[in-house]
Amino acid sequence: MSMSYADVLLPLPLPSLFTYKVPGDMSASIRIGMRVVVQFGKKKLFTALVRNLHNRPPRMAAKELISLVDQFPIIYPIQFAFWEWIAGYYMCHPGEVMNAALPSALKLNSETKISLIPDHGFNISNFSEKEYRIVTALERQNEINIGEAARIAGSQNVVHLINSLIEKGVVEAFEEVAERYKPKTEKYYSLADVYQHNEKALGTMLDYLEKRAPRQNEVLQALLYHLPPGSTQEIGIARSILLGELPHAESALQALVEKGMVIENIQAVSRFEKHAATRQVSEITLAEYQQLALEKIHEFFQNHVPVLLHGITSSGKTEVYIKLIEATLRQGKQVLYLLPEIALTAQIITRLRCYFGDVVGIYHSRQSDAERAEVWNKVKSWDSKKELDFHPSSIILGARSAIFLPYSNLGLIIVDEEHDSSYKQYEPNPRYHGRDAALYLATMHGANLLLGSATPAIESYFNARQGKYGLVEMNERFGNILLPNVQVVDVKEATAQKQMKSIFSQTLLDAIDIALTNHEQVILFQNRRGFSLRIECPRCHYIPGCQQCDVTLIYHKREKHLRCHYCGFHQPVQPSCPLCNHPELTLIGFGTEKVEEELSLLYPEIRIARMDLDTTRSKHAHHRIISSFEERRIDVLTGTQMVTKGLDFDNVSLVGILNADNMITYPDFRSFERSFQLMAQVSGRAGRKSKQGKVIIQTRHPSHPVVEQVIGNNYQGMYESQILERQRFLYPPFVRLVKISLKHKDPAMLDLAAANFAGMLRKEFPGKVLGAEYPLVSRIRNYYIKELLIKLARDATLPAAKQTIARLIGIFLKNPQHKQVRIVVDVDPM
Ligand code: ADP
Ligand code: ZN
């Protein structure tokens, strides 16, 4: 039955769907999940998604849909339901989830154009020189877009110009919607059908060409070489291959096509490099403890219980994953393999391709829009009936946003390094946690869920202890590699005994010497990037700070500037103190860049690389650094968190943690857990098959419990002590946190507004509201920030509590006094 109305979802932060009328010519083809173009607001056009079709006329007159973009739905109903769950759980709007979920290449791009209003009767003397140029261009051209207008007027501020022309009643603006994603195509050639099965005709033609058109003959011979007559390959041979062998033969090929002897057809081709589809490792033999773990996992899966695989570093979790993936592929289902960090994908993809061949799709934010759209379409067109197993894209390896791909039959989700806080999206909405959302996604698909880590999140381990997850442990390292020997250097004592050379203790330098002499590699971990933490005037203690944020600026030596790590603001270093004119400013503290430089002063002959946010901005930077290190073209790798994560190097014998203190002393209820995870993970990079690795931790708190737990590789100890603290002070997993940040440009107004809102919350949630307080960084980009924390019970009352919070925010923002206040809600903040 054809439906007259469509409720559509717009990619905007709006609380509801909007109803449009379906024009008669669209009603036969429109389906839920297709994209449509709609007008929303006065002039704006948007791509929206059809969510419902029905025959109930809305109360207000509905506008008509402008056009239908798709022939087939691009969204499955199950995806809508998933988006709606995310919006509900993380307290945001489904339109915001849609915006995050769809690759931008699939959203249409609305480009403003302008044209002259007919019969405007304008007066030339009214126009500025630049306005005049635009008007005369429009008389010639009918319509131009904003970019062209800027070029014609030779002006940067073209929006201002156009607004002025609109006010004068001369031009009008409208939006044109253009689709941005175009599949990459290539031309293919094959022999015309008439010659395929008629050798005589073919022979005659070749003779003819040999005499009259030798170039064309050559092209045809090459074609026949690749595609003998009667061959079954349908699409033909690619232009790049054919002409690659015969330069300057384009016109001859064109002539053959025009004569109808050769057929040309255009095919969409992949933007990704082709990988050898051959499997290099056909069989993995699991060690006994791995086999046991695998069997236990299967058992839990049979009872539809998610599993936490707690396996120490190098226990071979990846091998167990591979077995589980293979079993899932054999059932003709899809596998999603999530990783917290793009840096990790390169190593894992190589390991998976080695085993499965070219069946792995990758999806993360560093890819181009077009690449993301291509993976989206590949997953969308996945069909288990077509090829039962080893279908390309049956395995998707991705960062958190890969949960949004259009899966139709997920069998398994693996969340590797599940403890990692990079799974949480901080900004903007939806502020979701990839691991927790994956749990829901798995439930929807009836898929198995495996969380893996050497240092599980306290929440996950708690869930496992409670029986909500199955707990499977692997406490051996593959090949019986010994756990590294961890040694602590007391920096206070070393300084007193003059045993520190710049930022390195003599103990660490001696160990580096030994490793280098043995041609082994070293990883040095420093939690901060930049050269030095800050600059200070030794006389008046002036410290340069950011103009827009409440933080000190960090010195970056290579760029010779001071930079704000929150807003990106930067300025050159002053030659003298701007307050007291003292001629020299001193550097205090140190970051990754300084580690790199100091080390190269001590060891001028060795090869050092640095991996942090600053060195990995370009698309393939991670990959380059990691493979150079793997291939031993780098002796020492220094870096931030990025070097701590599940990378597997086989020649690293020493790991140095340069300063454990800034992690341990960070004021947050998770700082001990995080410090343990970071240190245990980076320590796990040390050690080789034949030899025990060494870890050296430099700290001013050598007897701190976390340091001792790292030394003993004592995850349980860390867990037991932390879970008691969490219970005593009511933190997750015993409650759910909702963080509400209020922002305002004026601190006095913010204080007032925050106090008001805190009062409203306390009335509804007595004894459960903390704050409002200034966070550690209390001003970012000129907005002052205050935070409130609400502790909610982890039970069935949670959805109602969230609704109450949403209602209070609505009331609060309606008050004209709070008009300038911005509110951000973060559920399960990290
Ligand atoms: P984890 O992820 O648990 O830290 P990995 O999966 O990276 O550990 O394994 C550590 C190393 O041991 C890797 O080089 C891996 O190839 C090797 N390994 C683990 N299990 C096996 C196995 N069953 N057969 C061969 N090599 C294995
Ligand atoms: Zn700033």
Image: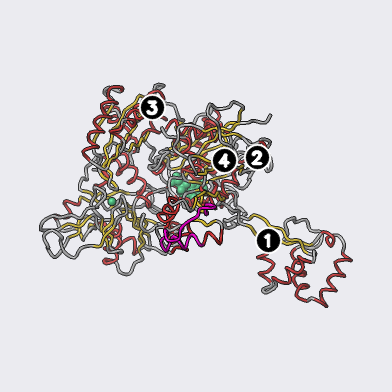
Work out whether mark 1 precedes mark 4 in sequence or the reverse, and give the earlier one. 1
Task: Give the residue number, with chain letter if any, for mark 3.
Answer: 802
Q: Residue at x 83, y 60 (%)?
A: 196
Q: Is residue 193 visible?
A: yes
Circle 1 or circle 2, nearest the eye: 1
Give the colour scheme of this rendering: secondary structure
Work out whether mark 1 precedes mark 2 in sequence or the reverse, and give the earlier one. 1
Identity, as a three-letter code, of the amino acid under mark 3: Lys
Q: Which mark is residue 406?
A: 4
Work out whether mark 1 precedes mark 3 in sequence or the reverse, and give the earlier one. 1
Percent across and percent down for residue 135 are 49, 59
Q: State which region is magenta.
A: 115-136
Local packing at callout 2 (Cα closer than 10 Å; few below 14, some 14-19, many 20+) is some
Q: Residue at x 38, y 60 (%)?
A: 520
Circle 1 or circle 4, nearest the eye: 1
Please state which of residues 91 and 126 is positioned toward the viewer in this rendering.
Answer: 126
Secondary structure beneath label 3: helix
Local packing at callout 3 (Cα closer than 10 Å; few below 14, some 14-19, many 20+) is some
- Cα separation, mark 2 vs mark 4, equals 14 Å
Task: Give the residue number, with chain letter if any, for mark 2.
Answer: 384
Percent across and percent down for residue 85 are 48, 31
Secondary structure beneath label 4: loop
Percent across and percent down for residue 698 are 24, 51
Circle 2 or circle 3, nearest the eye: 3
Task: Give the residue number, with chain letter if any, for mark 1.
Answer: 187
